[in-house]
Amino acid sequence: MKKMLSILVLLTVCLGFGPGAFAAETINGAGATFPYPLYSKWAYEYNKKTGLKMNYQSIGSGGGIKQIKEKTVDFGASDAPLTAKELDEAGLIQFPMAIGGVVPVVNIAGAAPGQLKLTPEVLADIYLGKITKWSDKRLTELNPGVKLPDDAITVVHRADGSGTTWIFTNYLDKVSKPWHDKVGFEKAVDWPVGVGGKGNEGVATYVKRIKNSIGYVELAYALQNKLVHTKLQNKEKVFVEPSIDSFKAAAAGADWKHTPGFEVILTDQPGRNSWPIAGATFILVHNNQTNCANARAVLDFFDWAYKNGSEMASSLDYVPIPKDVYELMEDAWSGKIRCGGKAVWTK
């Protein structure tokens, strides 16, 4: 028995296998709540097909970036893209997995989905605390025929470091100089007014419970929680509904090939049909891997999701990543991600 064990160890060394070289059973990720409904669906279907488990902690983009940098997970997830410089400093590569939209949602008695109209300036001024009542003249003039109460507006925002907040505040920063001057954009900001909920889930729950409130969530959360979304005026002065088609329109001009680090930002894009608060959601992995089996399993999972997950993405109102874009991403995997000096991903 001892001799047999020695032979097995010798074969392992000679064949170049090290710790984690055998097939992974579980991969772990953490980060953005924005894509959580989609990643959960993909993980469930992939587990049925392969037996591999994907554990994903929906803790917000800030937490996901922190955990991948600390190497406590196999992959991180963020809706706030890192810059090429940030990626280089952390030894990371990022790639998009889906495109979605951040949606203002309200709890106003009698209001129907898509009935309330907001302009960029009005939305910014609500979150700045300049518009404090639903009966404000600017709101009533925008919405003739909509019964708006003479009640205070409760503003709901994220309490955690959030890619959804990054997308939302990036948009407000572009469309409102007062917002730019006072608040700016980041995963977490110093909110002028309001109450904070943790995750898209927390914001959705608060808006659902608090009368006369307004919040912002990814569209899947609005639909799952039966929240009332608003229309929003886009760059072309057209009031549009959030939908997979308006998200596609916002992403139509994205130049993935020539954008360093794939840091594509989709807020306030041109086009009559474009939803103005669109964004991609990204996966982050290390360029230099130490657990070869887990590294390969992560890429196998996301390769499967690219090629087989489009219908599931569309059913949850996310825009799937087009083939020409995900092939570009997989070329980057081949060129950048290494384990033991060898490429983790080969076609």
Image (tube, rainbow, N blue to C red):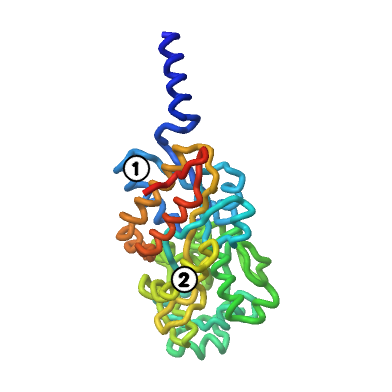
- Which quadrant would the N terminus be assigned to in this image? top left
* Amino acid type, residue under disc 2 in the picture: Asp
Q: Is residue 171 above or below residue 200?
A: below
Q: x, y percentage for residue 234?
A: 48, 82
In the picture, the disc for residue 265 is: none
Q: What residue does disc 2 label? A: 255
Q: Is residue 83 above or below residue 248?
A: above
Helix, strand or loop at mark 1: helix
Q: Are marks 2 and 1 in contact (CB under 8 Å)?
A: no
* Amino acid type, residue under disc 1 in the picture: Asn
Q: Residues within 10 Å of mark 1 (few under 14, many from 20)?
A: some
Left or right placement of residue 35 versus residue 316 in this view: right
Distance between mark 2 and mark 1 Cα atoms:
33 Å
Q: x, y percentage for residue 278?
A: 47, 71
Helix, strand or loop at mark 2: loop
Question: Viewer-proximal residue, 327 or 16?
Answer: 16
**At 44% across and 37% down in the image, what residue appears?**
293
Give the label, 2 or 1, closer to the camera: 2
Q: Quadrant of residue 227?
A: bottom left
**Any part of residue 110 in sight:** no
Q: Is residue 130 above or below residue 102?
A: below
**At 39% across and 59% down in the image, what residue appears?**
326
Q: What residue does disc 1 label? A: 47
